[in-house]
Amino acid sequence: MKAVRIEKFGLDGLSLVEMPAPSQPRKGEIIVKLKAISLNFRDLLMIKGLYNPDQPLPLIPCSDGAGEVVAVAEDVQSVKVGDRVVGTFFQNWNAGPYEKRYGKAVLGGPLDGTLAEYICLKEEGVVPIPRHLSYEEASTLPCAALTAWNAIVEQAKVTPGQTVVVQGSGGVSLFALQFALACGAEVIFLSRNEEKIKRAKELGAREGINTSRCENWSHELKELTEGRGADVIVNVLGADLNECVKSVSFGGLICAIGILKGVRTEVDVVSILMRQVKIQGIYVGNRLMFESMNRAIEKLNIKPIIGQHFSFDRYREAFSLLESGNHFGKIVIKMAE
Ligand SMILES: NC(=O)c1ccc[n+]([C@@H]2O[C@H](COP(=O)([O-])OP(=O)(O)OC[C@H]3O[C@@H](n4cnc5c(N)ncnc54)[C@H](OP(=O)(O)O)[C@@H]3O)[C@@H](O)[C@H]2O)c1
């Protein structure tokens, strides 16, 4: 089969290789013919050696992929040949609180990932694809969508009339926008790009703040919320945490998710305690949450926002676009029929 592998760290270290396809599933395993793969910022960090510099190579990158089941081991009960499935980010985090051991079974590092024609997974490492979604749309769900769902629904429990801030127009943020709107919230969309703000408003965002002309966006946010601040902030930038602290309402929640702007920053602790700000770290989500999310996506007819499709052989261009930050929504690689 064809697969892309990280042979050495860096985008130049990616190679398209020919390797044996998995053919015989062992106990509890299934084989999936991948139809679509979606990219996440994490994949870029993994490729560059910034996620885990000790990751053994070669490694097939990417955590997210959707496809058709082509073989199952004799004892497999929950999945059958022909099923349309999407892989789970954590292959073994089924339910309950996160434990360290789950981090050892993540696709795209440390386990081989989805940027290949076939993949062998445990039967509990996949969930069915919502009926109204294509393989390309379904491939966007395991990391970005589930992270946003965990933030907006599982942790923040957003209710109608609340104000939610999302930052940037990447995968996590646009899913957070869609889920927040579905919960009846008003969304304020932060972006460095006026055209992207226009597109987010077309999707339902109430207001946009262009962060390229005001780094200290808390002032504008306060004005837009008549001084109250936002109930929930989905923070994917990381290093602007203090700006989030200043922008959240009394007792409001900051979901700490991303590091697009860096991993270290100074935070005003007095402001956190006096304004009773809650900060919740989010690490994707478990299979149970994935199943709940898929039911909601199907019921509400939510369609993932895909910015651009690439064919498998154009994988380098796909990663370059991701690196540029110029995309709007998910970047998807489509396998040949
Ligand atoms: N904790 C978790 O479980 C989890 C799960 C998924 C992702 N993440 C993290 O969440 C973050 C977002 O992930 P993603 O996959 O959604 O990313 P993505 O799709 O690559 O999002 C990129 C978008 O963010 C904005 N952006 C990029 N770099 C920026 C910068 N330096 N300053 C300001 N804005 C910037 C841009 O939007 P504009 O052009 O509109 O500004 C860009 O389109 C990443 O740090 C990722 O590692 C964490």
Image (tube, helix red, strand yellow):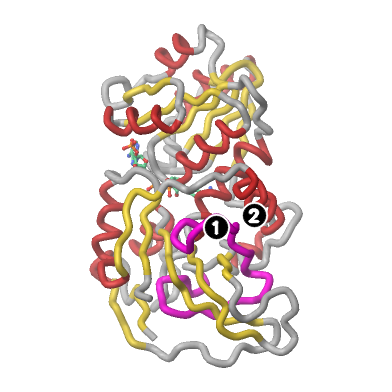
Q: Does the magenta stretch include residue 127?
A: yes
Coordinates of residue 85 in the picture (x, y in percent): 58, 68
In the image, residue 5 sits, relative to residue 310, either above or below, namely: below
Residue at x 37%, y 20% (from the top left corner): 216
Where is mark 2, residue-wise? Answer: 290
Q: Quadrant of ligand 1?
A: top left
Real-space CA distance between mark 2 and mark 1, rounded to the nearest whole angstrom: 8 Å
Instruction: Classify residue 104 as left or right of residue 323.
Output: right
Q: What residue type is labelled 1?
A: Pro
Q: Is residue 229 magenta?
A: no
Residue at x 45%, y 27% (from the top left corner): 205
Mark 1 element type = helix
Where is mark 1, residue-wise? Answer: 142
Coordinates of residue 188 in the picture (x, y in percent): 46, 24
Front residue of 262 and 228: 228
Coordinates of residue 95 in the picture (x, y in percent): 74, 57
Marks 2 & 1, CB-CB < 8 Å contact? yes
Query: Range of the magenta residues?
Result: 110-137
Q: Quadrant of residue 317?
A: bottom left
Residue at x 25%, y 56% (from the top left corner): 320
Residue at x 57%, y 38% (from the top left corner): 179
In the image, residue 112 sits, relative to residue 224, either above or below, namely: below
**Quarter of the picture holding the N terminus:** bottom left
Instruction: Classify residue 241 as left or right of residue 228.
Output: left
Mark 2 element type = helix
In the image, residue 150 sits, relative to residue 185, either above or below, namely: below
Mark nearer the N terminus (2 vs 1): 1
Residue 1: mark: none
Coordinates of residue 75 in the picture (x, y in percent): 75, 86
In the image, residue 163 sits, relative to residue 80, either above or below, namely: above
